[in-house]
């Protein structure tokens, strides 16, 4: 584990020093939400202790300073993903809201009956349901990128689903179930070739991979801060400037207007046009610290560390009889998320037994019901890794899974 010193990193995360069910916490559910370093927690609480004021409105020093801190994060975010300008980064509540913003604002203004929206069966519901709702509103058609048996996109079959009617392609950067990392540059080029837009659901991508939205050449990139060491209730929508400028507002209210008459209004310029109402100011301010932390450790180092963990975990899990692994073994195309089942045992039972050992994993459909159905399973157990995990966490998982097998005895094949 040379890429980064995860033992030192762990010291920055107070929750990792705690116990669960009387055992040291082994946290393997960062794909759902990451833990937070002390400094993020401090800046969050310091904001409420010493700096709290509403932004963009007060004619007093505290409000100016709160506004500066808030806008500082926007600048920071723009640098983090190499956006062309800070105003291309819209603050939302989460990746889900970011995607809904596009589906409503761009979708309502631009889609017509018969148009096609291209997604995949591997998408999180957050990148599926907003498009289903849009298709329903507009009489548009949802199409799906064909998948290979090992949960990758079948890039050889894109011609079957991309055509002149395709108006937008919306896919995850990295799957929250199998960890599959998709070929975004190829998909962006294919979208461009038919005049379609390209949206990336970066809820998993931005926390684990270095993101350069201009290099990807995506039109939109959706982010959740809570999956990347930041607070809950903060998301970002990156959009190309011209597109965002042309799009109508999503929600109406304070802050998103230039002026309001008795019967009409003029929307504010970017980014305020899309930021109606008082945002999660403390969360946005603390998010800067999360971005600083990730950059200081280095996204490339984080990825390398996670890949070593992934390799080790897959090797160890494969040695346990009765473990069924999902996703590709092509490690260059996946990140550190492992979905698995223990043959004959419901994933919730796996989760419960591991919980007794202090091991936190996820069990269920992971908000990907269509993909579960495609695999003909009701759900999986899922272990996901981050910069603060080490090989001892994998060892604890393996011990826990051997206990699952012992408890379920003959029900488990192998
Ligand atoms: C791939 C993916 N997309 C979207 C989301 C939704 O994120 P949020 O609930 O923060 O909006 C998640 C959350 O797990 C996810 O993994």
Image (spheres, rainbow, N blue to C red):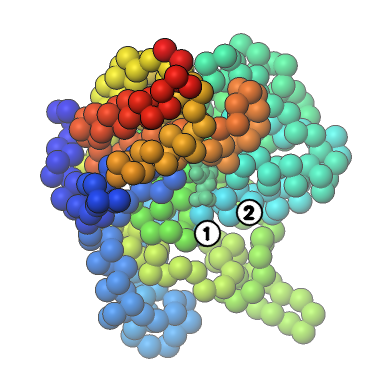
Q: Position of residue 377 (x, y in %)?
A: 60, 26
Q: Residue at x 20, y 32 (%)?
A: 392
Picture mark count: 2
Q: Are marks 2 and 1 in contact (CB under 8 Å)?
A: yes
Nearest to N terminus: mark 2 or mark 1: 1
Q: Which mark is residue 101?
A: 2
Residue 88 versus residue 298: which sits nearer the camera? Answer: 298
Residue 351 versus residue 154: which sits nearer the camera? Answer: 351
Quarter of the picture holding the C terminus:
top left
Does residue 155 lie above or below 38 as drawn? Answer: above
Q: Position of residue 4 (x, y in %)?
A: 17, 35
What crowding class fits label 2: few (fewer than 14 Cα within 10 Å), some (14-19), or many (20 or more)? many
Residue where numbered disc 1 is placed: 92
> Dot 2: what SS?
helix
Does residue 63 lie above or below 70 as drawn? Answer: below
Evaluate whether residue 2 shows in this view: yes
What crowding class fits label 1: few (fewer than 14 Cα within 10 Å), some (14-19), or many (20 or more)? many
């Amino acid at each position: 584990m040379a890429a980064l010193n995860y033992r030192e990193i762990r010291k920055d995360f107070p929750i990792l020093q705690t116990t669960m069910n009387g055992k040291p916490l082994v946290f393997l559910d960062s794909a759902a939400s990451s833990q937070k370093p002390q400094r993020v927690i401090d800046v969050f609480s310091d904001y409420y202790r010493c700096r709290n004021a509403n932004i963009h409105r007060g004619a007093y020093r505290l409000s100016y300073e709160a506004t500066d801190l808030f806008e500082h994060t926007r600048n920071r975010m723009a640098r983090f993903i190499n956006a062309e300008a800070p105003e291309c980064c819209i603050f939302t509540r989460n990746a889900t809201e970011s995607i809904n913003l596009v589906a409503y604002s761009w979708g309502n203004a631009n889609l017509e009956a018969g148009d096609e929206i291209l997604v995949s069966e591997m998408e999180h519901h957050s990148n599926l349901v907003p498009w289903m709702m849009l298709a329903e509103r507009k009489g548009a058609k949802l199409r799906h990128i064909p998948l290979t048996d090992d949960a990758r996109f079948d890039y050889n079959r894109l011609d079957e689903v991309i055509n002149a009617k395709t108006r937008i392609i919306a896919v995850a950067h990295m799957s929250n179930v199998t960890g599959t990392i998709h070929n975004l540059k190829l998909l962006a080029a294919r979208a461009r070739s038919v005049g379609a837009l390209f949206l990336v659901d970066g809820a998993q991508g931005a926390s684990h991979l270095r993101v350069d939205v201009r290099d990807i050449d995506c039109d939109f990139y959706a982010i959740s801060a809570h999956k990347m060491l930041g607070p809950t209730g903060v998301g970002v929508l990156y959009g190309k400037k011209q597109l965002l400028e042309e799009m109508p507002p999503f929600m109406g209210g304070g802050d998103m207007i230039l002026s309001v008459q008795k019967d009409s209004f003029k929307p504010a310029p970017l980014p305020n046009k899309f930021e109606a109402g008082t945002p999660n100011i403390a969360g946005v301010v603390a998010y800067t610290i999360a971005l600083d932390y990730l950059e200081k450790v280095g996204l490339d180092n984080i990825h390398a560390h996670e890949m070593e963990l992934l390799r080790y975990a897959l090797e160890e899990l494969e040695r346990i009889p009765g473990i069924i692994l999902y996703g590709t073994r092509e490690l260059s195309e996946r990140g550190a998320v492992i979905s698995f089942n223990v043959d004959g045992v419901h994933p919730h039972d796996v989760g419960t037994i591991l919980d007794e050992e202090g091991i936190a994993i996820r069990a269920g459909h992971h908000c990907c019901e269509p993909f579960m159905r495609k695999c003909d399973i009701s759900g999986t157990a899922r272990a996901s890794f981050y910069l603060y995990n080490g090989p001892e966490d994998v060892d604890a998982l393996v011990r826990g899974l051997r206990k699952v097998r012992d408890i379920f005895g003959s029900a488990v094949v192998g």
